Image: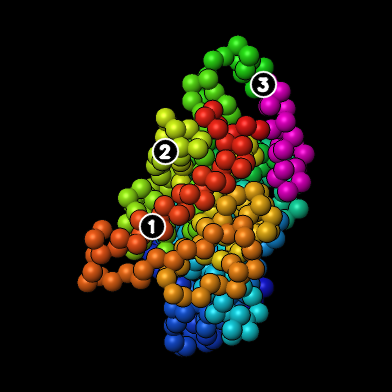
Amino acid sequence: MATSDPDPLLRLRQSIAADDAPVTTNSPDPNSDATENLAVATHLQFSNPHLSYPLETPTRFLSSDKPVNLRSIWFAWQKKDVAIPDYIASAQALNEELTNKNAVSRVQNLVFVERLDLITWLEGASEESEYIKGLESGASAKRSAQVASGAAGGVSTIPSGAAGARGARTVDPRLQEIYNGERRMGDRNSVLRGIKPTEHQDFSHVRKIAETFLSRSRPSKSLTTAPNPSLVSLPGKPPINSGKPSSHRRPDPIILLSPSASSLLRLSNIKLFLSDGLYTPPTTSNHANILHLTRLLPSIDPHRPLRFILVDTPEQFKPDYWNRVVAVFTTGQTWQFKGYKWQDPRELFKEALGVYVGWRGEDLPPSVRGWGRGVLSVGVEKWNPAVQGAGARWRDREVVEGIWGRVEEWMRSKGWGKEGLAR
């Protein structure tokens, strides 16, 4: 790829807008066959005009201040319509395949906000992205600042008599006079930079100044009687109650599930399992991102059932919500704990009960065995489509009661009572 070739990120956006998507190949040769397997592909090829970029090419999209390669960008675009757990599982599977093939680079798993921002920009719904480094050089940035301040004009002055200098194209003299009187005010980049260019478009100082004024307009906490706060959630997600004690309602304990595609229990089937004692296979159809179920735990509160919150990601957690996590369902895969407060499994399962659910009669994963007594390991009968219903799966209820018994014992040892967690 020549150095004069267009930016690959910009070229990808243009091809998507033109409905002329690129193809992945295992060679830069324009005549090479396309392949959909990103573990085998080495190049991303565009047509009209033909351009070929290695998939290891770093792009202007930054994650943790590091460039994301083109393979990760294209993978994120291909998975733009899948749910977060499926995207994570697909990225893990692809990286395992790349490792087996001794590939140079891996697919970077973008967090939800980064992936949403990237897809929005590629689709053309947004003209800017806080994660994409600008193409503008230092000289052009200075020029834009001069345009914005009026020190230099954005359009050079052309005498009206020069309208026909190019021969084939002429401009109406009256229209040319209007053009001559115009002064370009600058685009969004030059206006944002102001007279003095800002390094790396960092406007953190503006946020700090704004916070001073915003804090004055906020009502005092001592003067407001607010309802029980809730977790800030993404659009479409129901709110989760806060862990702060309230005279109206005790905090709800939280159960975290594994987002792994290989997990026997997902948000699509966990409620039926824990509430009715009946296992059914998880489905891949769209489902809620948060669930609630109630359970009476007599040793904690013999009169009022506790309401449990079930989620498969802690993305919307505030620090105090971790105090309410009472159980973590796991498949033994450590990547599940990447965004957790306690990322070391041994430390995590000192703070919350670990639960591993596998098939009855199968060996435990070595990782689960190594985590010790902090993880409860249980097995359910393998699913048989020919034999269904509560009568055929009566052992599921026994497994569920065992899980709830350990959860109740764990919560009691941690100080949970009628009014919540005593901490």
Work out whether residue 359 or residue 150 is closer to the camera in this orientation and state it: 359
State the predominant SS element of the stretch in magenta.
Answer: helix
Residue 333 picture quarter: bottom right
* Residue 251 versus residue 3 in the image, above or below: above
Q: Position of residue 270 (x, y in %)?
A: 39, 53
Q: Position of residue 113 (x, y in %)?
A: 55, 50
In this rendering, the label closer to the viewer, 2 or 3: 2
Instruction: Kindly identify which residue carries mark 2.
Output: 296
The answer to whether the residues at label 2 and label 3 have Cβ atoms under 8 Å apart is no
In this rendering, the label closer to the viewer, 1 or 3: 1
Mark pair 1, 2: CA separation: 17 Å
Residue 197 magenta: yes
The span picked out in magenta is 194-213
Instruction: Kindly identify which residue carries mark 3.
Output: 215
Q: Position of residue 71 (x, y in %)?
A: 56, 71
Q: Residue type at mark 2?
A: Leu
Q: Position of residue 174 (x, y in %)?
A: 49, 38
Q: How many marks?
A: 3
Residue 372 magenta: no
Q: Residue type at mark 1?
A: Glu
Residue 19 picture quarter: bottom left
Taking the image as shown, residue 222 lies to the left or right of residue 167, namely right
Mark 2 burial class by Cα count in 10 Å: few <14, some 14-19, many 20+: some
SS label for mark 3 = helix
SS label for mark 1 = helix
Instruction: Kindly identify which residue carries mark 1.
Output: 398
